Amino acid sequence: MGRVKLLRAAALGIFVGYAAHAISQSEQWQVLETVEAGRPVIVSVPKVLPNSATREDFPWVTSIEWPYPNRDRGMPADSLLDEMYKLESEVERVAVSKNLCRLAITRTGNGLRAWTYYAKERKVAEVDIANIVKLSFPDTVRVSVRKEPEWATLRDVLANVQDRPK
């Protein structure tokens, strides 16, 4: 069975969902694998959409994209992956831990690591997260934000997950 592309970056770095296979799950999250340009892409998403009150409180979809040189199977070098984890930890410290945004999707593979968050206010992405990126990480890392109160990006990914373990 061939796997079909799950995510592709659109103009603002927003994800568009296609089919993917679940390869691992925790109580609240699932790890998916798909193939993009012949290389594996690993995607982590929650099992379900947050409730409507949460979605209303976090209407700003925020994408952080970190392109990296494609090597072998399309995954980043370990040293670069360590830097990517530092970025994720900083966003956690500055915004997620203060309930200013929520992580919804991560994807790694085929030369791109990306995080999708939903923020309470546009400022969280345009100022708080953008400052983290600008001060400590390469210029190639991009942050974009747009209003998406219906959480369509996450909704599209969840709608296309195949082989959900029971």
Image (cartoon, rainbow, N blue to C red):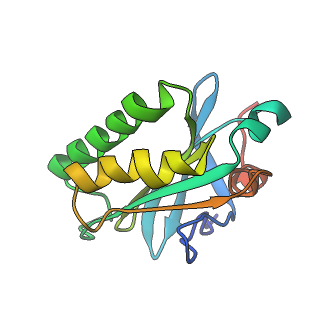
The residue sitting at 84% across, 35% down in the picture is 52
Where's residue 130, x and y in %?
A: 38, 53
Q: On the rendered structure, is 10 left or right of 142?
A: right
**Residue 86 in view here:** yes
- The front one of 102 and 108 is 102
Q: On the rendered structure, is 105 left or right of 86?
A: right
165 w.r.t. 22: above or below: above
**Residue 115 in view here:** no
The residue sitting at 28% across, 68% down in the picture is 140
- The front one of 104 and 61 is 61
Where's residue 41, x and y in %?
A: 46, 59
Please identify the quarter of the rendering in which residue 2 is found: bottom right
The residue sitting at 51% across, 45% down in the picture is 124
Where's residue 22, x and y in %?
A: 62, 44
The image shows a total of numbered marks equal to 0
Residue reaching furthest to the left: 79
103 w.r.t. 72: above or below: above
64 w.r.t. 27: above or below: below
- The front one of 99 and 165 is 99
Where's residue 62, x and y in %?
A: 55, 54
Quadrant in the picture for the C terminus? top right
The residue sitting at 64% across, 64% down in the picture is 1
Please identify the quarter of the rendering in which residue 5 is found: bottom right
